[in-house]
């Protein structure tokens, strides 16, 4: 029996084309990312800036001497003086301002009442903090004397805050004990101040260059509990809200302010800006000085004789854009 012949022809099996969709998507994403990185590196960068609203100010700094309508009141009795009003408070006619204790018993009662048990109010603390903040903003090492002036002012004010409240509460006790003391009331209305110097009776036209030398300037801050004699300063009464600042000027300042009738003033450490009527006057030494007249904010400077301020000669307001952003 014959065998069948085997067919040795082999036909290769062709596999079907399998497309991997995931690899294609990955390749496209990779290409896109590469293209994005390339274009990001090549393109010009965009910078972002915070643009605040502000102003560009051209100002001149000066120190002025404050002149007010002020009258010093003197004591008529000797003894320990105690005040009933705080610095910068308004006194009407007949308002009790201070008392003089000839025996010293009232001062002893006051010392017992203010032995540390009396706390300052929020308004008192806010006033003290405001003064300290104003001092820190305007302090310079060249005028170190202002440290002592500020210290005396704060000590006097703290003592006054405590003693005023204590005196009000001691009225009934003092009457029962029969303490011999004299109460003095205001004979005219005005703002009370306990800072006394030698310039109360000086007219702005009498100002001289020597008056601007603070090294020779002294002021007396009156305090409760102090022993006073007859005819000594007790307090000062400012009877008008109008006040003036007289300041020195250079030839450039005189030329810059010539012809102006009003100037905008910014007070250092007060965050206060206001216009003032401007004029040029001749002082007692024959020199020319600048004079600014105001009709408000007198109470805020009642304890100051020298006031630092800036005169704004040019101011442009708008959006402050840095030069690199153009």
Image (spheres, grey):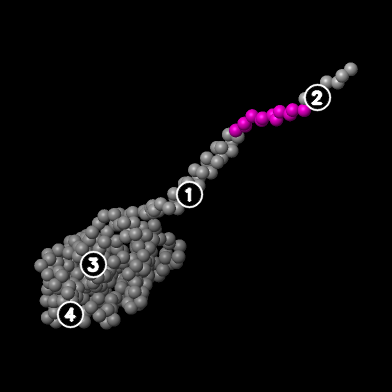
State the residue at coordinates (47%, 46%): 35
Earlier residue among tags 1 and 3: 1
Closer to viewer: mark 4 or mark 2: 2
Q: Which residue is mark 1?
A: 37
Closer to viewer: mark 2 or mark 3: 2
Real-space Cα separation, disc 4 to disc 3, in angstroms: 25 Å
Question: Where residue 159 sits: x, y (%)?
Answer: 37, 67
Question: Where residue 218 sits: x, y (%)?
Answer: 28, 78
The numbered disc on residue 157 is none
Label 3: element kind: strand
* Mark 4 residue crowding within 10 angstroms, few (<14) / some (14–19) / many (20+): some
Quarter of the figure that contains the C terminus? bottom left
Real-space Cα separation, disc 1 to disc 2, in angstroms: 64 Å
State the residue at coordinates (25%, 63%): 57
Real-space Cα separation, disc 4 to disc 2, in angstroms: 138 Å
Question: Where residue 48 sits: x, y (%)?
Answer: 38, 53
Q: Which residue is mark 3?
A: 59
Mark yes or no: residue 190 visible: no
For the view shown, which residue lies furthest in the right direction?
Answer: 1
Bounds of the magenta span?
Answer: 8-19
Q: Do the numbered discs 2 and 3 sit on residues whose CB atoms are within 8 Å?
A: no
Q: Is residue 166 left or right of residue 258?
A: right
Earlier residue among tags 4 and 3: 3
Q: Main secondary structure of the magenta part?
A: loop
Question: Where residue 162 sits: x, y (%)?
Answer: 38, 64
Report if residue 120 lies within the magenta region: no
State the residue at coordinates (59%, 38%): 23
* Mark 3 residue crowding within 10 angstroms, few (<14) / some (14–19) / many (20+): some
Q: Do the numbered discs 1 and 2 sit on residues whose CB atoms are within 8 Å?
A: no
């Amino acid at each position: 029996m014959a065998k069948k012949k085997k067919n040795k022809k082999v036909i290769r099996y062709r596999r079907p084309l399998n497309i991997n969709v995931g690899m294609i998507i990955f390749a496209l994403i990779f290409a896109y990312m590469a293209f994005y990185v390339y274009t990001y590196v090549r393109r010009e960068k965009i910078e972002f800036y915070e643009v605040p609203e502000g102003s560009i100010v051209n100002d001149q700094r000066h120190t002025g001497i404050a002149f007010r309508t002020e009258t010093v009141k003197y004591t008529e009795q000797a003894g320990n003086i105690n005040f009933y009003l705080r610095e910068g408070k308004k006194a009407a006619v007949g308002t009790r301002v201070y008392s003089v204790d000839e025996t010293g018993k009232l001062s002893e009662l006051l010392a017992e009442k203010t032995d540390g048990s009396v706390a300052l109010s929020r308004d008192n603390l806010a006033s003290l903090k405001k003064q300290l903040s104003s001092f820190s903003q305007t302090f310079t090492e060249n005028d170190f004397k202002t440290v002592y002036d500020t210290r005396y002012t704060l000590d006097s004010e703290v003592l006054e805050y405590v003693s005023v409240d204590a005196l009000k509460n001691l009225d009934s006790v003092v009457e029962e004990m029969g303490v011999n003391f004299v109460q003095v009331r205001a004979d005219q209305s005005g703002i009370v101040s306990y800072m006394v110097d030698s310039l109360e009776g000086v007219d702005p036209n009498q100002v001289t260059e020597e008056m601007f030398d603070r090294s020779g300037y002294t002021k007396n801050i009156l305090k409760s509990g102090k022993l006073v004699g007859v005819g000594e300063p007790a307090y000062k009464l400012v009877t008008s809200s109008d006040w003036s600042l007289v300041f020195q000027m250079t030839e450039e300042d005189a030329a810059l302010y010539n012809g102006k009738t009003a100037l905008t003033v910014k007070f250092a450490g007060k965050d206060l800006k206001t216009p003032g009527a401007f004029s040029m006057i001749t002082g007692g030494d024959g020199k020319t000085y600048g004079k600014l007249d105001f009709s408000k904010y007198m109470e805020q400077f009642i304890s100051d004789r020298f006031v630092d301020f800036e005169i704004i000669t040019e101011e442009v307001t708008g959006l402050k854009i840095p030069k690199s952003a153009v």
